[in-house]
């Protein structure tokens, strides 16, 4: 079996040592080496090019974002960002995602060695997921940066018991995505006119990053984009993004829709979970909804999209050719959950149909 070749780039000797040990323990991974900054990394990469780069953001001589932009322009390679989670850092990490990072592993300022050891399965999983990402497609779609135990949805929402009105004047669009979704959502939302159905979104993303992500999109889009808060109305021309670390469900009061943001266990290893959102949309909106599953690793959202289809909602999956990772759409298609399979470029048109 061909091993995943990984290069670690971090100015912390502790991070380089611990990450090297954690990754080397997995038989599917080969650690090519570790570098203290991007310039040292480039010397190593001239000898052997890695399949995945685990990259810090703040480093001497060249920052991680500049390095990643250089890599994406010259030879697109999957990058996992491993950065300290702070309010200031959240904006930096959003810039990294916009520059083409596949995923993020957050690290604290204190207790770093223990954290990395305890989070070894998450780090290994992030590297393996990144190795499957279609970064050439991601790099081609990048736009210039603007400065500024596995549970199901039963754990949050009981199955069945639909409460949708037969028909309402308001339409709901529910979108679920993961790896590669930050770029895919930007492509979709920036293509929408200001007048379009209300949108609810789950993007797998760590806590505190979703607000910066939503704010960035809000500055790029005609529609209003915000991180969802409890009891926010779902309105035409508005897109609500589930906060990282919280589940989001759709509720109905009369003919009006709103969201509830709540705690709960991980569902399909995620919080927020696409399945949780999709099931709530199936129950509350039924035939008045459109469900869209886009690029992402794993199967979160496949069961929920099937519930939406069974509730007579329209359902769409992104096609393989336009996905960074075809995991989530592939599983939804396999289960018969997707009424249509379309490229990313066609998804805004499906939303405008309502």
Image (cartoon, rainbow, N blue to C red):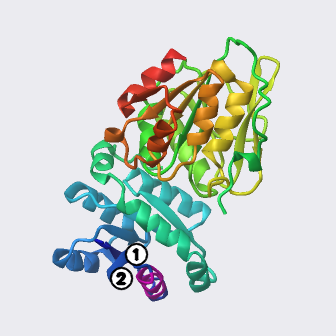
Q: Within the magenta stretch, is there residue 19?
A: yes
Magenta highlight range:
16-25
State whether residue 197 is above or below residue 269.
above
Judged by its main secondary structure, the magenta piece is: helix
> Residue 302: horizontal and vertical position, in percent?
56, 41
Please tell me the numbered disc located at residue 36. 2
> Residue 304: horizontal and vertical position, in percent?
62, 38
Q: Nearer the viewer, residue 116 or 112?
A: 116
Disc 1 to disc 2, how far (Cα)?
A: 8 Å
Give the quadrant of residue 237: top right
User: What residue is at 67 percent from the left and 63 percent from the top?
Assistant: 149
Please tell me the numbered disc located at residue 273. none
User: What residue is at 34 percent from the left and 82 percent from the top?
Assistant: 34
> Residue 352: horizontal and vertical position, in percent?
49, 18
User: What residue is at 46 percent from the left and 81 percent from the top?
Assistant: 19
Which residue is the site of mark 1? 59
């Amino acid at each position: 079996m061909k091993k995943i070749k990984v290069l670690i780039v971090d100015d912390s000797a502790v991070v380089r040592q611990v990450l090297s040990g954690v990754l080397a323990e997995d038989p599917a991974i080969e650690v090519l080496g570790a570098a203290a900054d991007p310039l040292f990394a480039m010397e190593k990469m001239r000898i052997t090019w890695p399949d995945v780069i685990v990259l810090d953001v703040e480093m001497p001589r060249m920052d991680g974002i500049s390095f990643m932009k250089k890599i994406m322009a010259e030879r697109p390679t999957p990058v996992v960002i491993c950065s300290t989670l702070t309010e200031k850092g959240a904006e930096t990490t959003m810039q990294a995602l916009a520059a083409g990072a596949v995923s993020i592993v957050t690290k604290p300022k204190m207790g770093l060695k223990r954290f990395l050891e305890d989070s070894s399965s998450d780090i290994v999983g992030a590297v393996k997921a990144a190795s499957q990402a279609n970064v050439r497609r991601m790099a081609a779609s990048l736009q210039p940066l603007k400065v500024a135990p596995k549970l199901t949805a039963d754990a949050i929402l009981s199955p069945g018991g639909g409460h949708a009105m037969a028909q309402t004047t308001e339409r709901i669009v529910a979108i679920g995505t993961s790896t590669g979704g930050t770029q895919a959502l930007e492509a979709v939302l920036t293509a929408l006119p200001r007048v379009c159905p209300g949108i609810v979104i789950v993007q797998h993303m760590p806590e505190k990053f979703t607000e910066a992500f939503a704010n960035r999109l809000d500055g790029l889009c005609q529609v209003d984009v915000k991180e969802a808060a409890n009891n926010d109305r779902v309105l035409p021309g508005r897109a609500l993004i589930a906060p990282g670390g919280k589940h989001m469900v759709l509720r109905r009061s009369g003919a009006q829709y709103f969201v509830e943001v709540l705690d709960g266990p991980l569902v399909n290893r995620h919080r927020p979970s696409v399945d949780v959102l999709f099931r709530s949309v199936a129950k509350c909106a039924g035939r008045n909804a459109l469900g869209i599953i886009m690029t992402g690793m794993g199967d979160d959202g496949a069961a929920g999209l099937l519930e939406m289809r069974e509730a007579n909602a329209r359902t769409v999956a992104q096609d393989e050719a336009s996905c960074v990772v075809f995991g989530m759409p592939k599983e939804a298609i396999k289960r018969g959950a997707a009424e249509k399979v379309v490229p990313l470029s066609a998804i805004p048109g499906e939303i405008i149909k309502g």
